[in-house]
Every structure is written in structure tokens, then in C-alpha cells.
Image (spheres, rainbow, N blue to C red):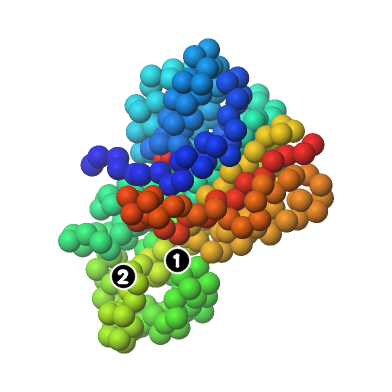
């Protein structure tokens, strides 16, 4: 399958990273390397002698392998790291890098992960596929474990908090009832359960697919997305040089809330300057070209000392 992903808010990311020709940057969510390629290309155009380096981290080996091919022409300007960004400190220690000039986090999943049926993320395919949703296939917990092993109470909380799903209680109950008959193994099994637990009026009247909130909640749980974000934030700020910038693009209100509160806290500690109070959002033109960018919110801080 071809690696297809249109990166969100590229122009703004590059502008706010304020890339220097000899700087060292971390792209902690390398994905298909779209943002990284633009940073490298732009810095070369601005200064042909640019010695910029990028540490590109991704927990998905398929993303790393694709980015290696795409960024090959930049040679040793890019260091590829197959790891979770929550281990930023140990990643940089291993590379003997103390401080960096900028860090980019473009959170969530890539379109490639969502669209590849073998990854078990999506119901938007005509195939019935095995529920999986692991970004890092070395990890044990998969979507099947979540739906078959978690208690009804825990499922309800995840569906409600991560999915913001109004029918969280009914769907959690239906999951538990169904798995008592037989294990829930595929995306169609789960779709069927969600369909049965929600009224037709709800399913046909919403913006987006009626199952997307539940699928997103399970994905965020499987990949412990909020926990990783909470763990990386203090490490990222610590690793910035004075004047270095941390640029974060989030796609979920809870992620944005975590980033907002963390930025406020470190501003009160006089560690950073917040570049703009309200998050930036993609232009209407970008949303038209890339509807998946619609929920993107960008926040940026600059390290003071
Ligand atoms: C929205 S995509 C990034 C796309 C990328 N900026 C580009 O231009 O192609 C998010 C990527 O981050 C990776 N990712 C998400 N959470 C991660 C984590 N905790 N550690 C490392 N990589 C992560 C995903 O595997 C995915 O490839």
C-alpha cells in the first residue's frame, strides 16, 4: 500500500519553528516525513550551505521506513529513531545531544495508518478487518484486548472521555453483552455493536460517521496517546535551547487542553513565552484540500532560559 498522508499546517509549522541553517531539530512524529522534508528543503533554499539536522522519531516502523526513502537525498542530515517520543530524554542522551533549537509534535495518526486495512484502525473500508490499532506493533495491547478484556465501567469512561460519545454507557453495555456470546475480533463486529446500541436518529443526523468517536477512543487508549503527550511535554521544554521553540499540532480537544495547561504552567514559571494565546487553526483553503486537517490546533512556546 502507498504511504499517503497530507501533513497539516505545514506552512505555519515551518514559520513558527523559525529554522536556523545550522540548527538541530526534533520531529517527534516523523510519519511520512512531510514536515521534515519541507523544513530541510526550505532551509536549503534559504541557505545552500545549511547544515541543519533533524532527529526524526516515530513509533511506527512503517512510517520510519517510508520516511527513510523519502528523505534519502538529505543524507546524514536526518537521524531516524524508531521509538516512542515519551522517551525523548533517553533518545537524545543516546545520540549525545544536550539541547535542540526546536521540536515539532504533530499528534495522532497518519492517514496511511487509518487507511491501511492491515492495521485495523478503520471501519471505512469494504473489508472486514481484524481490530488492532497499534501504532507500534511491538506492543502487546491491541484494540481486541480493549474491547474483550476491559470492564464495562472502564469502557464507558474511555468512550465518554476520549470519544466524547453521548451513547458511551449504552455502547459499553452492548460490547460486554456481545463478548459474552463470542469474542469481538473485527471492525465489522464492533460496527454492528455500535449500530445496535444507538438510535437511528443519532446515526443519521451527525456530522461524520456514527462510529468514528468510538474507534478514535479505542485507538487513543491502545496507544496511550494522552499519557505519552503528558510525559513528553516537560522533557521537550527542558531540551530546548534559549530561543528554541516547541510547536504542537493537536487534533483532539483533550490533547489541546493538556498542551494549553502545560504551557500556562511553564509560562508562570518564567520558562517560556507563549507566542499566541488562542490556538492557530488551518485556513479554509487547507481544510478544503485536506478535510482531515479540520480539527487541527497549533500552539507554540519559545524557551526563555
Ligand atoms: C499526524 S502523523 C505525523 C505526520 C508527519 N508530520 C508528516 O508530515 O508526515 C503522526 C505520526 O506520529 C506517530 N506517533 C504518534 N504518537 C507517537 C508517539 N507517542 N511516539 C512516536 N511516534 C508517535 C504516528 O505513528 C504517526 O506516524
Residue at x 45%, y 66% (from the top left corner): 217
**Left or right position of 168 against 51:** left
Q: Residue furthest left?
A: 126
> Vertical placement of 15 versus 45: above or below?
below
Category of crowding for the residue at label 2, using alpha-carbon neighbours closer than 10 angstroms: few (below 14), some (14–19), many (at least 20): few
Residue 230 in view here: no
In x, y percent, where is residue 100?
Answer: 65, 30
Residue at x 61%, y 58% (from the top left corner): 278
Checking the image for residue 261, the label placed there is: none
- Relative to the observer, which residue lies in front, 98 or 16? 16
Is the CB of mark 1 within 8 Å of ligand 1? no
Residue at x 39%, y 32% (from the top left corner): 67
Residue that carries the numbered disc 1 in the rendered image: 217
In x, y percent, where is residue 150?
Answer: 47, 71
Quarter of image, res 259: bottom right
**Left or right position of 149 against 303:** left
- Closer to the N terminus: mark 2 or mark 1? 2
Check disc 2 and report its element: helix, strand or loop.
loop
Checking the image for residue 209, the label placed there is: 2
Residue at x 50%, y 46% (from the top left corner): 106
- Relative to the observer, which residue lies in front, 7 or 193? 7
Amino acid at each position: 500500500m502507498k504511504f499517503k498522508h497530507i501533513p497539516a499546517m505545514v506552512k505555519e509549522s515551518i514559520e513558527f519553528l523559525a529554522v536556523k541553517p545550522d540548527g538541530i531539530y526534533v520531529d517527534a512524529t516523523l510519519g511520512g516525513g512531510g514536515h521534515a522534508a519541507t523544513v530541510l528543503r526550505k532551509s536549503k533554499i534559504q541557505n545552500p550551505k545549511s547544515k541543519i539536522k533533524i532527529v526524526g522519531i516515530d513509533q511506527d516502523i512503517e512510517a520510519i521506513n517510508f520516511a527513510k526513502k523519502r528523505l534519502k537525498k538529505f543524507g546524514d542530515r536526518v537521524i531516524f529513531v524508531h521509538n516512542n517520543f515519551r522517551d525523548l530524554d533517553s533518545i537524545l542522551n543516546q545520540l549525545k545531544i544536550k539541547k535542540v533549537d526546536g521540536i515539532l509534535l504533530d499528534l495522532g495518526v497518519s492517514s496511511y495508518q487509518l487507511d491501511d486495512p492491515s492495521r485495523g484502525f478503520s471501519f471505512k473500508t469494504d473489508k472486514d478487518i481484524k481490530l488492532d490499532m497499534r501504532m507500534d506493533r511491538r506492543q502487546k495491547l491491541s484494540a481486541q484486548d480493549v474491547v474483550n478484556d476491559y470492564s464495562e465501567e472502564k469502557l464507558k469512561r474511555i468512550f465518554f472521555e476520549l470519544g466524547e460519545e453521548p451513547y458511551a454507557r449504552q455502547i459499553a453495555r452492548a460490547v460486554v453483552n456481545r463478548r459474552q456470546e463470542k469474542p469481538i475480533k473485527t471492525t465489522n463486529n464492533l460496527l454492528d455493536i455500535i449500530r445496535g446500541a444507538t438510535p437511528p436518529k443519532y446515526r443519521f443526523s451527525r456530522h461524520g460517521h456514527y462510529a468514528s468517536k468510538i474507534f478514535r477512543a479505542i485507538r487513543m487508549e491502545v496507544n496511550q496517546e494522552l499519557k505519552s503527550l503528558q510525559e513528553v511535554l516537560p522533557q521537550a521544554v527542558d531540551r530546548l535551547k534559549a530561543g528554541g521553540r516547541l510547536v504542537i499540532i493537536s487534533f483532539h480537544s483533550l490533547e489541546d487542553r493538556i498542551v494549553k495547561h502545560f504551557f500556562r504552567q511553564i509560562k508562570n514559571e518564567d520558562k517560556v513565552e507563549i507566542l499566541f494565546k488562542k490556538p492557530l487553526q488551518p485556513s479554509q483553503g487547507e481544510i478544503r484540500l485536506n478535510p482531515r486537517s479540520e480539527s487541527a490546533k497549533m500552539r507554540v512556546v519559545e524557551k526563555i532560559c
